[in-house]
Amino acid sequence: MYYSQLMKQMGAAIVMGCLGLASCLPVKMDAYEKNQEIPGHQWSYQYKPVFEVTIKPEDTAYLYNIYVNIRHQDAYPYSNIWVLVNTQLPGDSSLQQPRRVELPLADASGKWLGSGLDDIYEHRIPIQQQAILNKPGTYRFTFEQNMRQNPLPYVMNVGLRIEKAGARP
C-alpha cells in the first residue's frame, strides 16, 4: 500500500516537473491577434482603430491569412459591415490606396454567421488568403467603418488576426 502511494506521488512530481520545464521554453507564435473596443459601442467615422504587426526577416518566407474580427450585439441593424482597410508597409510613410471590404455578418435569412452567446455575436472574417508580407518591419493596418449610418450602433469590438498559412513557394 505504501509503495503504490509513493509511486503515485513520484509520478505526479515528474509530470509537474515536466510541465514546469515546458513552461520555461520559448514559444514561437504563428499568429497575431488583437481586438479593440469600440467606444460606447457606437462606431463613428472618426474612430479608426490601428493595428501594428511586426514581421521579422525570417517570417517573410511565409504566406499569411488575414482576418477581421467583429463583435456585435444582436440588435445590430444590418447583415454586413463595409470597412475601409488602410495598409502602411514597413519603411513607407504613406498609406496605400484603401481597400473597401464587405464583412458579411448574416445569411440571406438573417441568421448571424458568427458564434453567439446570449445577444453577443463574434465573427472572424477572411479578407485576404495567402498574403505575402515580404518586407521585414512593422505593418500598420487601420480600419474605418464605411456604412451610411454614422455612428454605427451595437458594434462592440473590431480586431485583426494574421496567421501563418504555410511557406511561400
Image (spheres, rainbow, N blue to C red):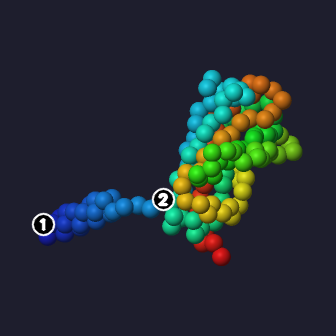
Horizontal side of 59 relative to 97 (left or right) equals: left
The residue lying toward the viewer, choosing from 139 and 17, is 139
Residue 77 in the image: above or below residue 34: above
Q: Earlier in the sequence, mark 1 or mark 2?
A: 1
User: Residue at (63%, 50%) from the top-left corner?
Assistant: 92
User: Residue at (24%, 63%) from the top-left corner?
Assistant: 17
Q: How many marks?
A: 2
Q: Amino acid at mark 2?
A: Met
User: Residue at (79%, 30%) from the top-left corner?
Assistant: 77
Q: Which label sits on residue 29? A: 2
- CA–CA distance in space, label 1 to label 2: 45 Å
Residue 95 in the image: above or below residue 148: below
The residue lying toward the viewer, choosing from 89 and 28, is 89
Q: Amino acid at mark 1?
A: Tyr
SS at badge 2: loop
- The x, y position of residue 14, in whole percent, is 24, 66
**Location of mark 1 (residue):** 2
Neighbours of disc 2 within 10 Å: few (<14), some (14-19), many (20+)? few
